Image: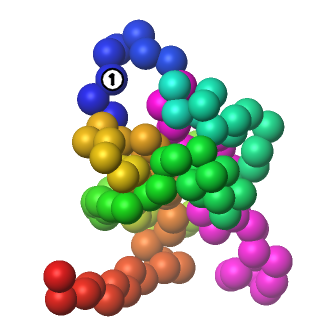
Amino acid sequence: MGLAADAEVLVRGWEAIEQGGSDLGGVRTIAQSYTRWDVATQAGLFGLESGPAVYLRLNASGYQITRVSEEVSARMPTTAEAHRMDLGPGVPVLSIQRVHYATGDEQPVEVTVSVMSAKRYRMVYDLGDD
């Protein structure tokens, strides 16, 4: 995020869980978001769960997200990730780092890192012409 090493950030973590058959049930995604402390304080993000409520609050506070940069990579899971997502040996994960920028702010306001099984997900993107 371009912050000093000792800068404070608001950290929110969550898991996406799917109910279903043996190959679909359980934890599907492990995610954490990091929001600049000044932004989190001004927008009043404390106590909010992740998701649409966060972005509505950011927008209402003048931090309209206008640009998102996403980096996707594949890697082997950590032992904790493999256990939590019930991944068998040799199953890689996708790690997605999504960086959110607001109008007139060159420094990211939030970064979200999501980890999911490469066996259960595929990435599909539609890109505009601009």
Q: Quadrant of residue 24?
A: bottom right
Measured from the top left, where is residue 75 in percent x and y? 33, 57
Measured from the top left, where is residue 63 in percent x and y? 49, 48
Indicate whether 127 appears above or below 13: below
Which residue extends farthest top? 6
Residue at numbered disc 1: 3
Residue placed most toward the observer, 127 or 31? 127
Residue 27 colored in magenta in the image: yes
Say whether residue 99 is visible. Answer: no
Residue type at numbered disc 1: Leu
Measured from the top left, where is residue 103 in percent x and y? 36, 52
Indicate whether 117 appears above or below 44: below
Q: Residue at x 43, y 72 (%)?
A: 118
Say few, some or many: other residues with alpha carbon within 10 Å of mark 1 (under 14 / 14 to 19 / 20 or more).
few
Q: Residue at x 75, y 75 (%)?
A: 18
- Magenta stretch bounds: 10-37
Q: Which corner quadrant holds the C terminus? A: bottom left
Q: Which corner quadrant holds the N terminus? A: top left
Q: Residue at x 51, y 64 (%)?
A: 116
Residue 98 colored in magenta in the image: no
Say whether residue 110 is visible. Answer: yes
Q: How is the image coloured?
A: rainbow
- Number of labelled discs? 1
